[in-house]
Image (spheres, coloured by chain):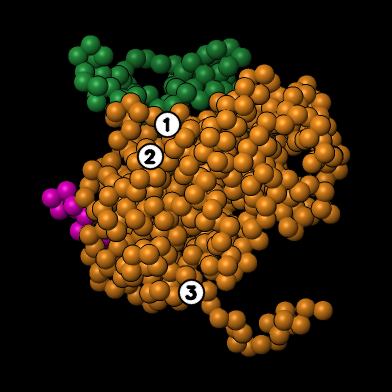
């Protein structure tokens, strides 16, 4: 009998402390204004306060904390990327992930599952070998495995997969899942404890500049004077950039996902198939968390479509025919801010004091800790952290794209 | 099911169509600078709004222009390309 729950039900007052304060009004000025109260924005606020002692910071969130892509992703954490800059960056993130629950004193349900990228073609096998070699070179635990190994770890799988027999897989043992909204709460609480203000339902209406420098932010709750602004707004990034007349290659396509009804545990690994364009894991509640490709055209909303569960289910049944009777419980979408080279755009911009953490497309959740940490460094020192210099917005002007092909939910 | 109107074949399910992207005019490649060219190739107005886009009805390979509101995903009008960008 959950006595604690009963106590909640009977109590007139909220018996648990709130995760963070809800301040009434904005102050007239802050040292740093962070737009976007998702994982990335809150992580940056947390590391600014903890590592750099910058605590006169506010986080502005149009909706509610973690209600954007932080709470809409499929919670997969891995570092088996293809490019050296990508693999190193995500591996540092994975290191941080492992300690987060302890650091926050909050159970993030961080669960190490092992991650398979299934290969159904010779070309996919070649890419798997390539990724494994790059990963090993940087000390990341990745290897190419055969169909027997896949079957051993996911006994319910149909190795024939309809007309796409599984030839092998890239196996990444550190692959994990975590409870995504708790990550935002953990960073939010940690930042708030150190003096950072979190303002929910506060929308940015404009950013003022003077002589190429940021001088203030207009919001629906009043005006803020500041010299440093970070935009960490994922799918809303182009709307923020339009206020400053900055064009980037970022384009917004919805990325949909869905969960099944809860089942007894039967899948303890994370499976991804590039050829079938699907990925699946089982949550700690027993739901199957499933995703597929990006929607095929630009839309700036989080609407869902019926085509999505229809297409995804058809592919999923090729891999797991026994799921044919399982019901889909809910589906949703997030706005993915895509870039042409599947790498983020991070760091300084042509406007002094305006920093960008964007272009996170389909790979932002796993990067939450390291993007927060490197952006905090970048803002505190007004100099990009060495891990993110390859992700500068200048790379397009200089034709120095990253060539990352390890991203999820996208065809290569 | 979402329906799109092909200027040749009439109303068809959106799954029959292929999205190419907003129409942009390239600068003259012989005279423009590398920076102007990269701006044309990579940068775009990513903000929501009504955009003119190239779409293709794939079974009949009909390329045409759609004016679409990318915020609400409403297709305002479709017509065959008449030249020019904006």
* Chain identifier of the orange chain: A
The residue drawn where x is 63% and y is 37% is A142
Spatial CA distance of label 1 from label 2 is: 8 Å
Residue closer to the observer: A8 or A411 = A411
Label 3 sits on a secondary structure element that is loop
Using the image, determine if residue A347 lies above or below residue A65. Answer: above
Crowding near the residue tagged with mark 2, few <14, some 14–19, many ≥20 C-alpha atoms within 10 Å: many
Q: Position of residue A3 (x, y in %)?
A: 76, 82
Residue identifier under label 3: A20
Tag 2 subunit: A
> Mark 1 and 3 residues: CB-CB less than 8 Å, in contact?
no
The residue drawn where x is 26% and y is 53% is A382
Q: Is residue A412 left or right of residue A280?
A: left
- Residues rendered magenta in the picture: A209-218
Q: Position of residue A272 (x, y in %)?
A: 67, 37
Residue closer to the observer: B73 or A223 = A223
Q: Colour of chain B?
A: green
- Name which quarter of the figure residue A61 lies in: bottom left
Observer-side mark, 3 or 2, equals 2
Crowding near the residue tagged with mark 1, few <14, some 14–19, many ≥20 C-alpha atoms within 10 Å: many
Q: Position of residue A99 (x, y in %)?
A: 56, 61
């Amino acid at each position: 009998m959950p006595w604690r729950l009963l106590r909640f039900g009977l109590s007139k007052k909220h018996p648990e402390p709130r995760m963070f304060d809800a301040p009434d009004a904005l102050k007239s000025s802050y040292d740093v204004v962070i737009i976007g109260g998702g994982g990335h924005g809150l992580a940056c606020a947390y590391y600014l306060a903890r590592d750099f002692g910058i605590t006169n910071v506010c986080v502005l969130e149009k909706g509610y904390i973690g209600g954007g892509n932080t709470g809409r992703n499929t919670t997969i954490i891995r570092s088996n990327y293809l490019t050296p800059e990508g693999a190193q960056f995500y591996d540092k993130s994975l290191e941080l992930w492992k300690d987060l629950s302890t650091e926050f004193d909050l159970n993030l349900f961080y669960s190490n599952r092992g991650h398979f990228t299934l290969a159904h073609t010779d070309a996919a096998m070649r890419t798997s070998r390539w990724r494994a070699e790059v990963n090993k070179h940087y000390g990341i635990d990745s290897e190419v495995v055969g169909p027997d190994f896949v079957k051993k770890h996911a006994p319910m799988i149909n190795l024939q997969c309809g007309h796409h027999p599984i030839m092998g897989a890239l196996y990444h043992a550190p692959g994990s899942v975590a409870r995504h909204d708790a990550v935002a709460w953990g960073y939010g609480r940690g930042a708030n404890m150190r003096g950072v203000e979190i303002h929910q339902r506060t929308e940015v209406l404009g950013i003022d500049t003077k002589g190429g420098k940021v001088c203030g932010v207009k919001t629906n709750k009043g005006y803020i004077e500041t010299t440093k602004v970070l935009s960490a707004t994922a799918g809303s990034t182009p709307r923020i950039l339009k206020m400053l007349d900055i064009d980037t290659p970022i384009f917004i396509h919805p990325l949909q996902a869905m969960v099944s009804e809860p089942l007894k545990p039967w899948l303890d690994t994370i499976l991804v198939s590039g050829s079938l364009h699907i990925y699946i894991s089982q949550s700690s509640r027993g739901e199957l968390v499933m995703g597929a490709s990006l929607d095929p055209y630009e839309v700036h909303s989080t609407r869902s479509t019926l085509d999505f569960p229809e297409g995804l289910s058809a592919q999923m049944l090729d891999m797991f025919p026994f799921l044919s009777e399982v019901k889909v419980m809910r589906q949703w979408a997030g706005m993915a801010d895509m870039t042409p080279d599947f790498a983020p755009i991070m760091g300084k911009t042509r406007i002094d004091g305006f920093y960008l953490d964007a272009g996170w497309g389909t790979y932002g959740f796993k990067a939450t800790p390291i993007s927060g940490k490197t952006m905090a460094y970048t803002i505190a020192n007004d100099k990009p952290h060495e891990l993110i210099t390859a992700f500068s917005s200048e790379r397009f002007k200089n034709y120095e794209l990253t060539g990352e092909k390890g991203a999820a939910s996208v065809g290569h | 099911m979402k329906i799109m109107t092909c200027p040749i074949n009439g109303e068809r399910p959106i799954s029959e169509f292929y999205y190419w992207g907003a129409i942009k005019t390239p600068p003259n490649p012989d005279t423009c600078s590398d920076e102007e060219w990269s701006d044309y190739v990579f940068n775009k107005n990513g903000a929501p709004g009504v955009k003119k886009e190239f779409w293709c009805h794939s079974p009949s390979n009909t390329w045409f222009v759609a004016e679409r509101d990318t915020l609400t995903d409403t297709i305002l009008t479709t017509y065959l390309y008449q030249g020019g960008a904006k």
